[in-house]
Image (spheres, grey):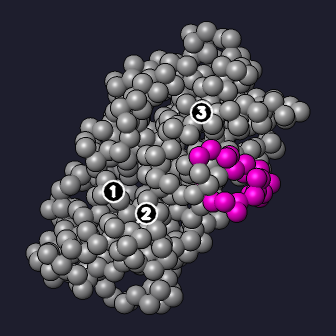
Amino acid sequence: MKIALVSEHASPLAVAGGVDSGGQNIYVAHVARQLHRAGHHVDVFTRRDRALLPAVSDMDGVRVIHVPAGPPTQMPKEQLLPFMPEFADFLIGFCRRERQAYDVIHANFFMSGLACLKVKATLGIPLVTTFHALGKVRRLHQGADDGFPDERFAIEEQLVRESDAIIAECPQDAIDLREHYGSDPTRVEIVPCGFDTTEFSRVERSAARAALGWPQHQFAVLQLGRLVPRKGIDTVVRALARLRERTSVDAHLYIVGGNADLPNEIATPEIARLRGIATGCGVADHVTFVGRRGRTQLREFYGAADVFATTPWYEPFGITPIEAMACARPVVGADVGGIRYTVVDGKTGFLVPPRDHDALAERLACIARDPALGERMGEAGFERVHASFTWTRVARMLEDVYLRVARAPEEAPRERAERSPRVKNTRAAQAAVGRA
């Protein structure tokens, strides 16, 4: 097939960890590479955010097309919506110039979807949409801090109605699509995110600590990812303080991420806020901000940790927990969204309520007091992600969706449902995941 992946603000070439560089960048990069390896022609369209970028870049055989839409500078994604008509016009012109039309176009995020709706209407190319985050759910959790305009809701509703298939990344995502957007369950496919088996694997803890310069016998808690308030990193800082206050555990928190390789409060304002919280809790000397790190370095950080902690308020999927499990480390995560799907409570780690630092401290203490429990959980997580969450498997599942919508766009929803088994009762699926 000839496949177009559209990701307006999240380039697959960007370094993850910044404010607008995270799971979507990783998702698009790995899906594109895996589909290319499976023999498909794959192009990725992303906004040109630097003046000196070439029109087309090569990424391991995948073409990355830098779309001239808006000024060629980095901008917060919340400011990009006005440039989507220009983005759409470029896509249509590019598609018309290609000798062979795309079999399917896969929009990532609602703004990409808005541009792709015009492509679908003009050229008739089947449309698959992955939202990565839903505006109505995000607004419930972020309130006035949500910088997107209300018109996002209507755009998402239109995409839910007009996409040929919608990718939900976990059962909760499918539930949210139905309850907040009235989605047709026969057009919703649950396809998770994944990890790269060549990037993440077991690593000997003492060797990883020696390489990073970490103390060998300290209880090390790792937090890794984008440094923004909704990720709930303040909960981990406060839990560290509770853990040290109430137990004899010599615990230290390492926070990896940000907009610069060296921790910088100007480049990454969230660092200043978190440092203030750590100082107020009396644990400033026990929290290390590492800065942004490249993908090839992350395995060492996961491997050096005793436990990975992630407590966002809202998380459509969350790639970092499965990366930690791929390195055979236990995960203590917020009982939300995709984390509820990937982490099996009591088996591969623990689930705790979001914003509950006391519950998080209690679960961290369980692992600190019983290292063998942490090892068993790490091994169970390792087995789980290899069975269900590799990028190779994710790409095969997406390939099935693409083939269906490309070959039979005229089929009625009922006929598609009979041909392609999927999770219809997402509440039952949620319960089944909890029993796994």
Q: Quarter of the image holding residue 306?
A: bottom left
Task: Tell me the residue that label 2 is attached to.
Answer: 225
- Residue at x 86% of width, y 31% of height: 100
Q: Amino acid at mark 1?
A: Lys
Select label 3 or label 2 by which is in front.
3
Residue depicted at x 60% and y 72%: 296
Q: Is residue 320 above or below residue 84?
A: below
User: Magenta span covers which residues?
Assistant: 49-70
Q: Which mark is residue 85?
A: 3
Q: x, y (%) of residue 149?
A: 37, 36
- Residue 427 is tagged as none
Q: Earlier in the sequence, mark 1 or mark 3?
A: 3
Whether residue 27 is visible to the viewer of this picture, yes or no, is no
The x and y percentages for residue 133 are 43, 41
Name the residue furthest left. Answer: 246
Residue 195, given in percent of the width and then of the height, sits at 56, 56
Left or right, 204 with respect to 247, comes to: right
What's the CA distance linking mark 3 and mark 2? 31 Å
User: Which residue carries the number 1 mark?
Assistant: 231
In the shown orientation, is residue 384 left or right of residue 392?
A: left
> For this rendering, which residue is in front, 75 or 321?
75
Measuring from the top left, give residue 410's x and y in whole percent.
68, 11
In front of the other: 312 or 387: 312
Mark 2, other Cα within 10 Å: few <14 / some 14–19 / many ≥20: many
